[in-house]
Image (cartoon, rainbow, N blue to C red):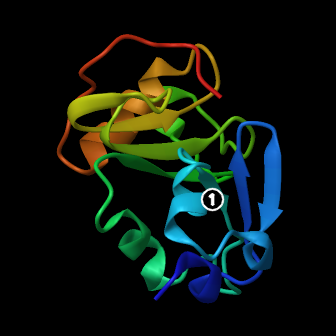
Amino acid sequence: MKARDMFPESFYTSGNVFLRAEELPKGTEELARLLPVTFSAETDERGELPCGTVLLLGGARCGQLAWMGVSWPAVPELGLGPEWARTGVQACFNSTAEGEPAEGHTVLVHVRRGEDERARHLARQIGQTLIGLEEEGW
């Protein structure tokens, strides 16, 4: 199944080219000339993306999934209230955060500048630790 069929209301970006799903080229060669492509879709009424999202990365050598606009809960023990701005999770598969090919996989947690403790707390919730220093992100 093609991405344009799975996500008919989505948008695709490649450089300065913005396309709706129905505007994507049908031919493999024409589509390949657009790579790399960024795919944007809205969540459903439950706040979830369709399960086919992961299938988009199926045969790709590298790619990313990003969830933007998530809400971080309050962490009273750290003096942190809930946060809705500057939030997100970015999963990079054989890719850097900038979309360049790389070995391995990385999950980046986006928090408000200076809230390293929130990032550490989020990592602890899944039994992990931060492996890098704070970086400027999206």
Q: Nearer the viewer, residue 78 or 134?
A: 134
Q: Secondary structure at mark 1?
A: strand
Residue 111 drawn above or below residue 84: above
The C terminus, quarter of image: top right
Q: Residue drawn at (59%, 23%), measured in percent from left and top?
A: 137
Q: Position of residue 108 (x, y in %)?
A: 41, 35
Report the residue marked by disc 1. Answer: 39
Residue 95: name its quadrant.
top left
Q: Position of residue 39 (x, y in %)?
A: 63, 59
Q: Residues within 10 Å of mark 1 (few under 14, many from 20)?
A: many
Q: Nearer the viewer, residue 21 or 80?
A: 21
Q: Residue drawn at (51%, 82%), measured in percent from left and top?
A: 2
Q: Position of residue 20 (x, y in %)?
A: 80, 69
Q: Amino acid at mark 1?
A: Phe
Residue 77: name its quadrant.
top left
Residue 104: name its quadrant.
top left
